[in-house]
Image (spheres, grey):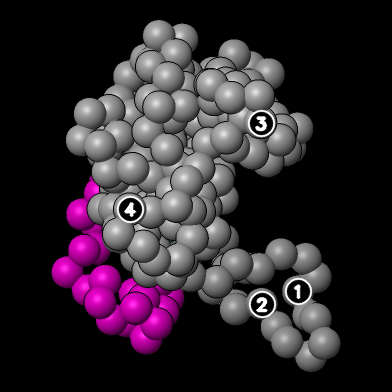
Amino acid sequence: MQAGVITIFPEIFSTITRFGTIRKAIESNLFEFKSFDIRDYASDRRRTVDARPYGGGPGMILMPEPLAACIDYAKQSVGGPVIFLTPRGERFDQKMAEELAQVPKFTLVCGRYEGIDERIIKTRVDQEVSIGDYVISGGEFAALVLLDAVVRLLPGVLGNKESAHQDSFSNGMLEGPHYTRPEKFEGLDVPRVLLSGNHQEIKKWRHQQALDWTRKRRPDLEGNYNQYR
Ligand code: 6GU
């Protein structure tokens, strides 16, 4: 998989190549990452990329020309669909992560300031994606969230092949509780069934725990169970 990211803060993305799952995916040649700095495509000496909104209002808007030039370059270099990260986009979830994990190349556009010129969306954006119903200052952290969620699903990235299947949401439910050594901690025991060695009983217990937890915390997920399996 190859992903491009278009941003005015390329340094934010240097962290993903250095840590954890994404680093491992890059080192195993399962994932390649390129960032593109919008300022490199500005036409003035001050590298201006934003301007006041027509019609007035607060904040600054990313201007169309440098952004267009940057997207066009990234499309040549990486290719694939162009995804704009914005709170007004379609909500990102595990299902979308699984779909994107099947796409070999894509480019993410990170907005900043109050937004980007609408004509860029019209001419160059294939999909608009939001990571949730709250506002963050730009698309960069949303891109990091999306990339982590997608890259960990690539075959060969996670050590234990099973581990992505057991995640919260991968079967439409939240995960149940986990325990490890010691058997007693501050007076609290590990549930007996987990020490029983009876794998069928353990499976049943875990399923029931996940169900109970999901109903309590996220009743809105009822009806989604096993949707993705
Ligand atoms: Cl993708 N961008 C910004 N700025 N805020 C968000 C978001 C994206 N998703 C949720 N909030």
User: Which of pointers 1 and 4 indicates the residue nearer the eye?
Assistant: 4
CB at disc 1 and ligand 1 closer than 8 Å: no
Image mark for residue 183: 1
Measure how far apart labels 1 and 3 are at the Cα level. 63 Å
Start and end of the magenta stretch? 203-229
Query: Residue under circle 4?
Result: 54
- Tag of residue 190: 2
- Viewer-proximal residue among 194 and 53: 53
* Residue at the spot of label 3: 46
The first of marks 4 and 3 along the sequence is: 3
Q: Locate the N terminus by quadrant.
A: top left
Do the CB atoms of the residues marked 1 and 2 lie less than 8 Å apart?
A: yes
Determine the CA span between mark 1 and mark 2.
5 Å
Q: What secondary structure is marked by label 3?
A: loop
Which of pointers 2 and 4 indicates the residue nearer the eye? 4
Label 4 near label 1: C-beta < 8 Å?
no
Q: Indicate the amino acid at tag 3.
A: Arg
Measured from the top left, where is residue 32 in percent x and y? Answer: 56, 18
Can residue 99 be found in the magenta stretch?
A: no
Q: CA distance from mark 2 to mark 4?
A: 62 Å
Farthest-out residue, bottom:
187
- Of the two numbered discs 1 and 4 on the same chain, state the one appearing first in sequence: 4
Task: State the separation of the CA atoms marked 4 and 3.
Answer: 22 Å
Mark-to-mark CA distance, 2 and 3: 62 Å
The kind of secondary structure element at disc 2 is loop
